[in-house]
């Protein structure tokens, strides 16, 4: 890169950040030079969003340095970062639909006329100048943002950043919601910004995009720095390897279980726009791994199977019987259990005790005529705490006070109380410590041995490869590949996750 | 990527036209259409005297609805405004009767309104108590306080000069003039001032507002203070029309004011709406009430019509929003 | 979320224990104080009579506790009381329904009104506050329209037994209230229904993901709220012998104040029927005590308003300190 010799616009060194129960970042370093697009790559939970939140002043790091133009800075609030020239464009665009383009751009720092009134003429003129500077000719300063397409709204966000004279622009998955045409236009804008010497931090899961637009890439995994590469010197296979890692040592060895009759048979499941014609089968005693990049529709498929967002078309059979699963209650009645991805928001009632969390999904079985058998409930919870090794002072402790791993054991345990036939695990070991992880893996093997069919979604390829009897790969709402245990190598699965248009060639 | 195709609107420009093509135009049409329809059934409805009565007698509701709109746009609610207007009217009348200068009798309720509402806003914003609890509590404090202090005594013998509402401004009766001026000023302020726009930002997306340097808490206090200001002005119009001020609170007034704001196009979920719509809706509601009499329907049905109207508007608003949201949803 | 999510367990969380103890202490102190101040206060007759007077509010406060525990609110209860009362009188007088049928009709109207609230809240996803403000206007308006603001009186003598009679010296409706308190308390404390309410109020998504029927439960509690308001209307008409369309005006304040004062969190997830009962008794005794010491009736609603705001303030600041 021509800019390599200059001082980086932004540099972070040795950033550390922990949240209760989670180590989000440990020793991450990273820099952006003028006129450079530096990509941040990593699976969900790798620490990308924590990193950008620190750089944009939303979080304060526990340790480490942030340097702007080589000078150490402290960002106590988003305003500080903005003043230093850092602007962030989040995935959920933070715009006000009722206000116009110009107003959205200048909200909070509008040009003022005498007496503090907004100088509308100046504001419109400035907005139009900004629009012109990026050759945006199909957007007017006085349009109401609520009527705009997602691509246009994103341009407004970029303009807002530029109106603050941002020199470092952080873009969090900017193409996630864009059409192809909008992506092309976004890249044109990004290139123009590069010419002006703006440094861009670019986050995306789409590797092919990175090869088009990025100059360098830094890969994070589990909050740690894995490596940095010039895009010209790497290829997609290497990046996937870096992203998903090889930590077989953490894993509990898979115990083979006898595989029985199909428990779940799904044919042609459709739920627009995230699940498009999915057919799959999971057998008793079998662990099926569901791999795919973020946004490929894995969790959405799980929620279709569990009845939270019921399928619009398609057939589901449980033990060979056609069933209609249009609510979680139906799913539970059919013997399906779902351990959701977002433990805090979907899995656990943090303000309830361990006892009550354990029984929450099994209340029907614990009660007669609606009355809860409290002695049985307590026995169940206490047995669960022992069986799953939940570390808690008592079952009356509030679930929210436990560590992530222990919370996950509770969520898992509450579903096992129903003796499910099919267990769907969505990122069962994300963000929990190694010991708890191994215990959950041991438990999965145990359950498979008892004849439970398990469908496991995981972003960690080693986990998928290590635990699964069979691996399914999902991309853009479809199942695109299937591997049996013997053929499921990280190269093959990784390639299937990334998809057809071969980014390796382009990189070469 | 093949998202749901986004139908592009035929009106890409914002401008005055698009803004008024919505709820305000609909309301203006309804106001005129209803007048014509009722006029067919009973021509006396269109008599100048009647139409003037509708406007004069309800201008204060429209004025109070301006502040209510701001409160709702900011994502809050206030159900104490009816009681507050009752209290302020009594204060104003008592001052006038006690021989205070007319100007004092006019200004004190406005100042008092600002203070009471700003205090509520501060509790809502800084102590994070839901507005419904604060204003429900305040409603009972004001209502109960008023009656226990005055014993429900009527205030009579108001001095001649007190009756602001009897005056004319350039030939326009004062209540109507104040309503028009207040609406226009508020509309312009909300549209063109930074703090006016901050209200929309706070109600639309408080978190985003914060990231843009808007202070949502301060905005909420300001909104309540302004609401109190307009409640004070509404009180002036209301109280100085009366020959006798009953020191009670006008029953159901808060609901009428909320209805006007909501039917006027203020989304109850915050972030959307204009004060012009609220004023038009206040006029429409008054017109409906009056029309019932002229088409021989018992006026006792007014309240259920009002309730039905607010319910229908709220449901339509939410359904419309959801449709818009699902259109813009990422795949 | 809050630590005082007091889903009733064997070991009640300390905070709640303290809150209810505190309330009980205040209650006893208030009783003693008022008793010392006025010798007519602490008499069996007076206390039983107060029980009679608080029944209508109490009946509604039970399902309101459920509603607020889920993080919802129902402002239309007073209007439903008015509507049910009018329907009782109207169906009896104008339709010529036999009185028992008219009573059933009034209850059904109350239940239906509540069902409409719950249905729109869950299906259209109108926030409960807004929905019930709208139906507050609508139901009161219907009461006014149907009755044309005319009152109905002259009910048969036997009907007054409910509102004015007594059984073993205890006001009839107070017995009814006690029975319903026990049922509501047990339902909240011991059943899957009650557990579901706490789960919804603490984390609605997790409740849904735990295969609890969130929507149906919500419809049920708003319907119960309407039904209880209908029952309160019947008791009220029987007590005061006439039906007027403005019956129940302002009840929502007393009901919500009793529930919130009793320690139910306005943010959802926590609360008990016991707390509500204490809150209810406190409010009634406050009213009565103030009345006996010569304070006019209207001043007591000032006190209720202050109590509502203060108890929410205290609860929320305690909650924040715990977080």
Image: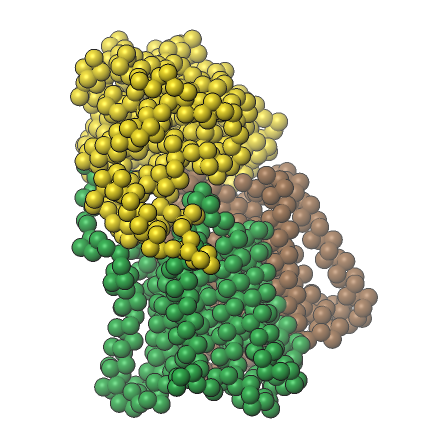
Chain colours: A yellow, B green, C brown
Q: Quadrant of residue A393?
A: top right
Q: Position of residue C92 (x, y in %)?
A: 43, 79
Q: Quadrant of residue B142?
A: bottom right
Q: Quadrant of the N terminus of chain A?
A: top left
Q: Can the viewer see residue C34?
A: yes
Residue at 34% across, 29% down: A198
From this view, report whether residue C237 is shown above or below residue B41.
above
From this view, report whether residue A419 is shown above or below residue C47.
above
From this view, report whether residue A224 is shown above or below residue B323.
above
Considering depth in this image, is A205 or A417 the residue closer to the camera? A205
**Is B34 left or right of A355, judged from the image as shown?**
left
Q: Can the viewer see residue B327?
A: no
Q: Quadrant of the C terminus of chain A?
A: top left
Q: Position of residue A266 (x, y in %)?
A: 23, 30
Residue at 71% across, 53% down: C24
Residue at 43% across, 83% down: B169
Considering depth in this image, is A125 or B319 the residue closer to the camera? A125
**Is B204 left or right of A204, judged from the image as shown?**
right
From this view, report whether residue C194 is shown above or below residue B81.
above
**Is C11 left or right of B11, judged from the image as shown?**
right
Q: Position of residue B98 (x, y in %)?
A: 66, 84
Q: Position of residue B325 (x, y in %)?
A: 30, 48
């Amino acid at each position: 890169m021509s800019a390599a010799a200059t001082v980086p616009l932004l540099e972070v060194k040795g950033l550390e950040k922990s949240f209760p129960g989670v180590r989000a970042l440990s020793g991450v370093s990273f820099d952006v030079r003028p006129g450079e697009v530096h990509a941040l790559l990593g699976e969900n939970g790798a620490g990308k969003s924590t990193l950008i939140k620190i750089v944009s002043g939303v979080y304060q790091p526990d340790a480490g340095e942030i340097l702007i133009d080589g000078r150490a800075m402290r960002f106590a609030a988003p305003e500080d970062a903005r003043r230093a020239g850092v602007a962030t464009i989040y995935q959920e665009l933070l715009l006000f639909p009722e206000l116009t383009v110009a107003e959205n751009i200048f909200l909070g720092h509008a040009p003022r006329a005498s007496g503090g009134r907004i100088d509308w003429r100046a504001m419109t003129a400035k907005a139009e100048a900004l629009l012109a500077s990026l050759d945006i000719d199909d957007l007017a300063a006085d349009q109401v943002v609520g009527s705009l397409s997602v691509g246009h709204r994103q341009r407004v966000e970029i303009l807002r950043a530029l109106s603050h004279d941002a020199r470092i622009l952080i873009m969090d998955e900017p193409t996630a919601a864009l059409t192809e045409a909008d992506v092309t236009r976004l890249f044109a804008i990004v290139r123009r910004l590069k010419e002006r010497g703006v440094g861009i931090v670019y986050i995306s899961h789409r590797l092919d995009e990175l090869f088009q637009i990025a100059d360098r890439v830094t890969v994070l995994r589990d909050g740690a720095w894995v490596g940095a590469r010039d895009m010209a010197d790497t290829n997609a296979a290497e990046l996937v390897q870096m992203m998903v890692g090889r930590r077989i040592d953490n894993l509990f060895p898979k115990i083979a279980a006898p595989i029985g009759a199909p428990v779940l048979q799904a044919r042609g499941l459709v739920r627009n726009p995230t699940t498009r014609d999915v057919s799959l089968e999971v057998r008793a005693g079998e662990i099926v791994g569901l791999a795919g990049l973020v946004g490929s529709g894995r969790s959405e498929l799980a929620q279709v199977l569990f009845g939270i967002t019921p399928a619009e078309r398609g057939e589901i059979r449980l033990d060979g019987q056609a069933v209609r699963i249009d609510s979680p209650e139906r799913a539970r009645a059919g013997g399906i259990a779902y351990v959701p991805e977002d433990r805090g928001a979907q899995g656990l009632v943090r303000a309830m005790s361990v006892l009550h969390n354990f029984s929450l999904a099994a209340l029907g079985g614990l009660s007669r005529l609606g009355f809860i058998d409290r002695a049985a409930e307590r026995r169940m919870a206490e047995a669960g705490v022992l069986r799953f090794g939940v570390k808690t002072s008592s079952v009356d402790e509030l679930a929210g006070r436990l560590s992530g791993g222990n919370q996950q054991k509770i969520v898992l345990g509450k579903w096992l109380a129903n003796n499910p036939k099919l267990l769907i695990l969505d990122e069962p070991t994300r963000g929990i410590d190694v010991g708890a992880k191994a215990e959950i893996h041991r438990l999965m093997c145990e359950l498979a041995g008892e004849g439970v069919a398990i469908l496991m979604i995981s972003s960690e390829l080693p986990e998928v490869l290590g635990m699964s009897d069979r691996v399914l790969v999902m991309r853009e709402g479809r199942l695109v590949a299937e591997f049996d245990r013997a053929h499921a190598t990280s190269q093959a699965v990784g390639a299937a996750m990334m998809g057809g248009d071969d980014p390796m060639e382009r990189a070469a | 990527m093949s998202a749901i195709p986004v139908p592009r609107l035929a009106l890409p420009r914002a401008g005055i036209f698009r803004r008024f093509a919505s709820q305000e135009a609909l309301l203006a049409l309804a106001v005129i259409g209803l007048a014509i329809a009722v006029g067919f059934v009973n021509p006396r409805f269109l008599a100048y005297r009647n139409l003037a009565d509708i406007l004069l007698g309800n201008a204060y509701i429209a004025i109070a609805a301006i502040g209510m709109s701001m409160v709702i746009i900011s994502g809050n609610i206030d159900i104490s405004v009816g009681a507050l207007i009752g209290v302020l009217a009594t204060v104003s009348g008592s001052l006038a009767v006690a021989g205070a200068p007319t100007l004092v009798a006019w200004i004190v309720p406005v100042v008092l309104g600002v203070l009471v509402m700003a205090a509520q806003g501060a509790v809502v914003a800084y102590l994070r108590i839901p507005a419904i609890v604060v204003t429900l509590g305040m409603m009972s404090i004001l209502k109960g306080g008023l009656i226990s202090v005055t014993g429900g005594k009527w205030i009579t013998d108001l001095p001649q000069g007190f009756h602001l509402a009897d005056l004319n401004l350039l030939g326009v009766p004062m209540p109507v003039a104040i309503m028009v001026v207040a609406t226009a000023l508020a509309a312009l302020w909300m549209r063109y001032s930074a703090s006016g726009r901050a209200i929309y930002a706070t109600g639309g997306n408080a978190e985003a507002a914060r990231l843009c340097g808007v202070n949502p808490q301060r905005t909420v206090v300001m909104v309540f203070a302004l609401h109190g200001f307009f409640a004070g002005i509404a009180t002036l119009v209301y109280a100085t029309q009366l020959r006798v001020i009953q020191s009670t609170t006008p029953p159901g007034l808060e609901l009428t004011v909320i209805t006007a704001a909501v039917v006027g196009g203020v989304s109850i979920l915050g972030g959307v709406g204009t004060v012009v719509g609220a004023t038009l809706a206040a006029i429409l509601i008054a017109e409906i009430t009056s029309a019932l009499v002229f088409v021989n329907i018992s006026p006792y049905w007014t309240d259920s019509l009002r309730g039905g109207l607010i319910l229908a508007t709220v449901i339509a608003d939410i359904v419309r929003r959801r449709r818009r949201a699902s259109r813009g949803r990422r795949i | 979320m809050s630590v005082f999510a007091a889903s009733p367990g064997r070991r009640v969380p300390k905070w709640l224990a303290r809150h209810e103890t505190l309330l009980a202490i205040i209650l006893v102190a208030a009783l003693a104080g008022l008793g010392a101040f006025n010798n007519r206060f602490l008499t069996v007759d007076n206390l039983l009579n107060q029980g009679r007077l608080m029944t209508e509010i109490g009946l509604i406060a039970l399902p309101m506790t459920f509603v607020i525990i889920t993080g919802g609110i129902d402002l239309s209860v007073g209007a439903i009381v008015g509507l049910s009362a009018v329907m009782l009188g109207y169906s009896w007088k104008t339709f010529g329904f036999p009185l028992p049928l008219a009573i059933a009709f009034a209850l059904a109207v109350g239940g239906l009104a509540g069902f409409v609230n719950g249905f729109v809240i869950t299906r259209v996803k109108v926030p409960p506050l807004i929905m019930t403000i709208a139906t507050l206007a609508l139901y009161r308006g219907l009461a006014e329209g149907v009755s044309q603001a005319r009152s109905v009186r002259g009910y048969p003598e036997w009907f007054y037994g409910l509102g004015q009679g007594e059984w073993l010296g205890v006001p009839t409706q107070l017995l009814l209230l006690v029975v319903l308190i026990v049922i509501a308390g047990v339902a909240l404390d011991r059943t899957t229904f009650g557990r579901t309410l706490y789960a919804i109020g603490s984390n609605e998504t997790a409740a849904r993901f735990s295969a609890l029927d969130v929507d149906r439960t919500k419809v049920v509690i708003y319907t119960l709220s309407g039904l209880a308001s209908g029952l309160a209307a019947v008791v009220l008409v029987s007590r005061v012998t006439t039906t007027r369309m403005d019956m129940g005006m302002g009840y929502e304040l007393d009901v919500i104040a009793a529930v919130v004062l009793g320690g139910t969190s306005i943010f959802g997830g926590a609360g008990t029927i016991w707390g509500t009962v204490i809150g209810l008794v406190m409010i009634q005794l406050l009213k009565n005590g103030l009345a006996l010491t010569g304070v006019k009736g209207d001043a007591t609603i000032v006190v209720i308003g202050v109590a509502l705001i203060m108890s929410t303030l205290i609860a929320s600041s305690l909650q924040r300190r715990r977080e």
